[in-house]
Image: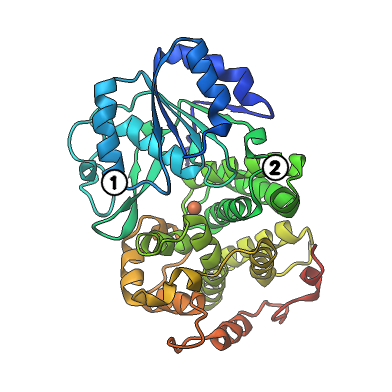
Amino acid sequence: MFQFMTSTRIIFGEGALQSSLSVLNQFGYSVLLVTGQNTSRASPLINYLKQQNMRYQHVAISGEPNITMVEETALSGRKFKPDMVVAIGGGSVIDMGKALAAIIPNQGDVYDYVEVVGRNVPLKTKPIPFIAIPTTASTGSEVTRNAVLRSGQDQVKVSLRSPDMLADVAIVDPTLTYGTDSYTSGRGAMDAFTHLMEAYVCGDPNPLTDMVCEEGLRRLSGAILAGCLQDDFKSRSDLSFAAMLGGMAITNAKLGAAHGLASALGGKLAAPHSVITARLAPYVMQENIRAAQDAGRADVLARYQKVAQILTERTNACRTDSILWVNMMLDKLGLPNLNSFGVCSTSFEDVANDALKSVAIKGNPLPLTKERLTYILQQVCQCQGECTESADIERASLAEVVDESGRRGLSPPIADIK
Ligand SMILES: [Fe+2]
């Protein structure tokens, strides 16, 4: 038995924004508009609101949203009494809009409703209508039921979550991602990858999320380099589709240790969520493969092998090729390592403890102990100085993950991937 939920209506395709703006009229006449600092991609929407004489209040955020920001904006939002919230931007903007749509009609403190650090009580009143328009191919937040918020006082990231928070309309127009710089595109695509991969190998997949993940991984792997590095339009479209599928997958399956550790690290480092998850992914995959080998979990190992086969488009790919593919993409896309954000200065034990409290880590295919999570962090930290853990450990541990074929290290089938 399984269930599958997603946004009520999805409008996908090139030109979707311009051709579907009239959908706003069915929700009323006043709009709380949430954007990032750069509003150039929102101009067709803003022009439409003016042309239709709709009331709107504009909130422009920078960076990832935090709980205080939601509380303060909700106060002014309640006075404005919007009929709907429309968010157009990257994942942070969509999450902010989603949180506002939920909190504006619900009195009390945001901490009443958030997971892990809050009381986690269900929303008393349904959110007001919410329209999500992503301008990046990354989080898939347009089809997820949670908003990720930073808790400043607890130094972790947590979710405000409810099935009622799924967007009423998701307008996914890949043209909105055209021209995005390669760094933003690359880290977003790798976050989408981590969603698809973690949902595929998680402890609670279902046949529909499996289909979604396999197609998402297929589209993403074929498009990631041309889309992110060359702004190829067809590839951009595939990345938008893959990112949306990633959002569907994590809403209906689970995540894993990469996102569990990222929720802990994300509150402590000034690093984008996407970079953190992408940099953690290969080490978590490696640890999970080793744990699955130790536990004799052929089902989990088969899933990693399938991931490798899809990513490399080779039927003879072995499961560790999935790790090599990720490392190759991190390299080609030029994503910074977490040392540049000061990961070495965090307490790995505290991060591991916080990660164990996260919702995401409960989806990991096998339970990982605090010691194993700490080991992952030691590997992510590639500091050659103060930390005793170094690249030597990284190489040694990769060699410990051996496919049944006995292949280790960089295997020939993947070495020539362009
Ligand atoms: Fe993510």
Q: 301 or 336: nearer the eye?
A: 336
Relative image position of residue 324 (x, y in whole percent): 68, 70
Relative image position of residue 234 (x, y in whole percent): 76, 40
Residue type for callout 1: Ile
- Mark sitting on residue 236: 2
Q: Is mark 2 within 8 Å of ligand 1?
A: no
Say which residue appears at 19% left-offset and 31% top-offset. 107
Q: Secondary structure at mark 1?
A: helix
Relative to residue 321, is residue 355 drawn left or right? left
Q: 209 or 265: nearer the eye?
A: 265
Residue 218 makes an appearance in the image: no
Is residue 262 positioned above or below 410 on the image?
A: above
Query: What colour scheme does the image use?
Result: rainbow
Is residue 44 positioned above or below 183 on the image?
A: above
Say which residue appears at 42% left-offset and 64% top-offset. 261
Relative to residue 150, is residue 226 drawn left or right? right
Residue type for callout 2: Arg
Relative image position of residue 311 (x, y in whole percent): 71, 58
